[in-house]
Image (cartoon, grey):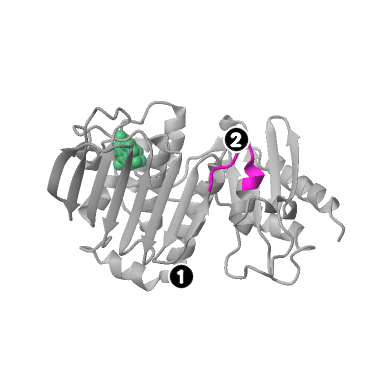
Amino acid sequence: EHIIDQIKAGEVLERPASLLKELIENSLDAGSTEIHLHLIENGMDLLSIEDNGHGMNFKNLPFAFLRHATSKLKSFEDIYRLHSFGFRGEALASVAASARLTCTTQPKDLNAEGGKIIINGGATELLIPQRASTQGTSIYIKDLFFNTPARLKFIKSKVSEKSALKKMIYSFVLSHPQVTFTIKWDEKEKEIFKAVEVDSNIERIAQVFFSRKTETKNIIAASQEYEGYKVQVYFTRETHTTPQYRHHYLFVNKRFFQDKSLHQAVLRNLDIFWRFGESGHYVIDIQAPPEDIDVNVHPNKTQIKFLRSDVVYSLLVTSLKAGIKTQAI
Ligand code: ADP
Ligand code: MG
């Protein structure tokens, strides 16, 4: 019963950032190692994603855009995902109903046929088989919410929508260092995050903080462990050069989450570096036993509860202090 409620709660397609989150998750589920994004007007005019994942067969293509098409509910991990990723077989169906969508796909087996589908406001206008020379899926979404009152709301709240999109995109960039991401905003230059070597999290963090993987020397790193918990912290000194955007991220077991009190704890402990009101960047990477994490919260939020929050909190504080100690102030 609980799970049904969660699915229902996820049916509302809240905003461009929630939609794009679902699309990126689908591309990652398909095993993609390259994901290319293009956003015009924060995704309201165009939101596109191109991947090199395992694609879909022609006969499965239309089913991707029907309600409850999910084939992915199998295990505990799926329940976790259910909580974390909202829609469950709903994302593509919801967007197909309130946008102009084109999808082309080529399955991994290059002898098999993929295809192309065009759906406008819920009506299928084209569905044809076709074959491409490389595997992968591309989805182009135009005029998001064009037939709903929600559109106006997002066109008005440009700044907050852009920062929600950035936070979500960069959290995937950070948690998938082995995937190449490119992001094009409007017609401006692309941001490029080339795949880094397996387990070189710090290079990916340097790409996100400083746009260069070689800048790792400007990242202070430390970690602490206790009874199956591990907290790794990565932070910078005050950054005067990039005033518009602060990178602040919390991850647990490679999944992004938000937590005001942990965020405040980071700010308090780093205020020796960040005392001029201008803060720097941080990434906090927490590993915790899965059974100690309560993901029983609203699916459209990215909150979780730790059964042993005292352990998490004290590992966080001690690793921040250990990191500070390595620096001459
Ligand atoms: P879910 O991810 O919960 O299964 P979605 O509505 O997000 O539901 O997607 C529906 C189905 O469409 C997926 O189960 C998958 O089979 C297919 N699909 C969607 N996006 C892709 C993609 N980028 N590559 C391959 N298959 C995809
Ligand atoms: Mg999905």
Query: In this orientation, does residue 88 appear?
Result: no
Above-or-below relation of 15 to 126: below
Label 1, on which residue?
A: 159
How crowded pointer 2 is (Cα within 10 Å; few <14, some 14-19, many 20+) is rated as few
Q: Amino acid at mark 1?
A: Val
Write down the quadrant of residue 134 in the picture. top left
Q: Position of residue 158 (x, y in %)?
A: 41, 70
Label 2, on which residue?
A: 198
| Residue 62 lies in the magenta stretch | no
Q: Secondary structure at mark 1?
A: helix
Residue ID at (64%, 46%): 203
Magenta-highlighted residues:
194-203
Farthest residue in the right direction?
328
Residue ID at (56%, 47%): 174
Residue 246 versus residue 231: which sits nearer the camera? 246
Select label 2 or label 1 by which is in front: 2
Query: In this orientation, does residue 192 appear?
Result: yes
Residue 253 versus residue 313: which sits nearer the camera? 253
- The quarter in which the N terminus is drawn is top left
Q: Position of residue 214 (x, y in %)?
A: 67, 51
Q: Position of residue 291 (x, y in %)?
A: 57, 30
Q: Amino acid at mark 2?
A: Val
Q: Earlier in the sequence, mark 2 or mark 1?
A: 1
